[in-house]
Image (cartoon, rainbow, N blue to C red):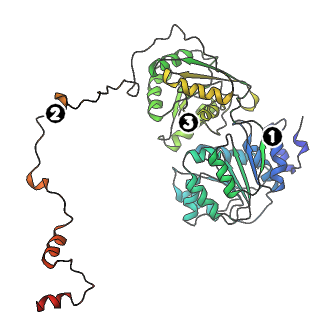
Amino acid sequence: MATFDDFKISTPLRNAIANLGFAGPRPIQEKSFPVILSGRDMVGIAQTGTGKTFAYMLPLLQMLPFSKEKHPRVLVLVPTRELVVQVVEEIEKFGKYSSIKVVGVYGGTNMNRQKEELSEGADIIVATPGRLYDLALSKALRLKTVKKLVIDEVDVMLDLGFRFQLNNIMDLLPARRQNIMFSATMTDEVNKLIHDYFITPENVTVAVSGTPLDNIYQASYSVPNFYTKANLLVELLKDNDLFNKVLVFVSNKKDADRLFEVLEEFYSSEICLIHSNKTQNHRLRSIRQFDEGSNRILVTTDVMARGLDLNEISHVINFDTPSYPENYMHRIGRTGRAEAKGSSLLFFTEKEILAKEAIEELMGIKIPILEFPPVVEVSTRLTQAETPKVVEADNPIKREEDLAGPGFHEKKEKNKRINQGGSYKRIIAKKYKKAKTKGDKNYNKRNKRK
């Protein structure tokens, strides 16, 4: 088994690793270290939760000598604000015994404060693409000194629509640099980005995209509708010992708010909520309280599905079956981290069966279906999205209720007129046969003679 003694790293880094209590490098770290240290471009494909942050930061910190340069030499791009905060904290732990300064910048906060912090200098910048591009355009950040570029969770960035910002950031960076990319999935968009900007990259793969983590137990429940899912979740969460730290994924913000209202009635002091409409302070506070154990249950959308390293999550509950099977992999990757045991439950309705089958096809396994607990009430209440819509068959005759009501009145005659393009032009054109133009200096003279 490999150990960190096999790595050629400085004493300050070795001491920081010892403080963190890492027994030895994980596969992605062991394979990435020599490639990144060599200076070659690299593309790493690894499942979420396999230690990708440490995989790129260890060799980068080893190669980053002391410098009085105020502008950044390493740039790390991540898709979300929460990931910026987390990566900055991780780098600070690794660089505990060095003089490395790291600054995180992201949207949703005052940009002037970030400009002030950047003016004091930074060795490493961790940023979301949108805010970084804004800072670069405002001349608050100079990117020509960047020697190492890391794009983490690149497939999420592209899904979130950051391709435009990524392209523009690449143009602002120096041509001579090392490019490092990490992703859990390889898509056509990711391949295109690699083709456009990477120079013969070394591929490092420790797990095929879609391979489930062996230490995560998976099961599912067939449930008819939203409120029955909520009833089932309320019943399951009664077991505090088994469900001691639960992350609940919901497909959209509206349903997340709706589910939170239901659960709050039973678990008001144990539950918190995160989605993109919540303020940055609220999101960070909720993450901290959940991570520290103050809250047992965290309801969220897929904003939390990628990259965040939360401690000892016992269960991931997929309240909705994700439309994209890759998202399921990222969700369940929040549990079973660092080779710990974890559990994942999937709730699916009849309409979500095809999505469940797509997930099973991606993973190459069948997710077992558990018996629905008889004590759980099957609700007849439906959400607006679940309510059947009455669609009238083709009928040339309007129904009586479709006819104009008493509030209807005919337009006035002047409002029925058709717009003919402006009265001035029409009147002048009729009088002079053509529109008057300023360019014809003799136009008025000729008309006076007539």
Locate residue 208: give its quadrant: top right
Upstream in the sequence, badge 3 or badge 2? Answer: 3
> Amino acid under label 1?
Asn
Report x, y in % for residue 123.
71, 59
Helix, strand or loop at disc 2? Answer: loop
Which residue is at 54% across, 59% downward? Answer: 134
Reply above or below: 116 against 363.
below
The label number, if any, that marks residue 403 in the structure image? 2
Count of marks placed on residues: 3
Nearest to viewer (mark 1 / mark 2):
2
Using the rendered view, name the quadrant where residue 239 is placed. top right
Quarter of the figure that contains the C terminus: bottom left
Q: What residue type is labelled 3?
A: Asp
Task: Please state the horizontal and vertical placement of residue 439, each as a whole percent of the image.
Answer: 28, 85
Of 130 and 420, the residue lying toward us: 420
Find disc 1 in the rendering and name its residue.
19
Label 1: how many Cα within 10 Å (few below 14, some 14–19, many 20+): few
